[in-house]
Amino acid sequence: MATAHLHLPHLHVPHVGQPQDQAHRDGTRPSHIGGVILGIGMLVAVGCWAASVVALLSLGPARSGAVDGVTAGWTALAIASAISLFLMGIWKAHRA
């Protein structure tokens, strides 16, 4: 008796080591200097995030209503550095 099933498109996640093995076969490994630059960028993003969190904690709680420019600036820096750190982490994982 045959059973029918619906095959939905989905993301195929490669096994651990597969991209690296394919890169070895193709001879296209990621450059070492690119990894160093990406690591430095990640350190800068972590530093910006940590500095903005410390600054926000030292400013204290915001009052309801309009927020001053200093709090908005530090909040924007914290959000932007967290997002960029997340994206660089994904990029670094895909390079491996």
Image (cartoon, rainbow, N blue to C red):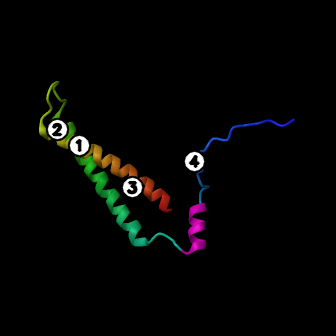
As drawn, the residue found furthest toward the bottom would be 27
**Inter-mark Cα distance, 3 to 2:** 26 Å
Q: Residue at x 58, y 73 (%)?
A: 26
Find disc 2 in the rendering and name its residue: 71
Q: Residue 96, how many percent across, how many down?
A: 50, 62
| Numbered range of the magenta stretch | 18-27
Q: Give the left or right position of residue 72, taking residue 42 as reference.
A: left
Ranked by sequence position, the earlier of labels 1 and 4 is: 4
Q: Which mark is residue 76?
A: 1
Residues at badges 1 and 4 in contact (C-beta under 8 Å)? no
**Label 3 Cα neighbours within 10 Å, binned few <14 / some 14-19 / many ≥20:** some
Find disc 3 in the rendering and name its residue: 88
When the figure is inspected, residue 19 is found, relative to residue 62, above or below; the finding is below
Q: Residue 66, how many percent across, how many down?
A: 14, 29
Circle 1: residue type: Ala
Mark 1: which secondary structure?
Answer: helix
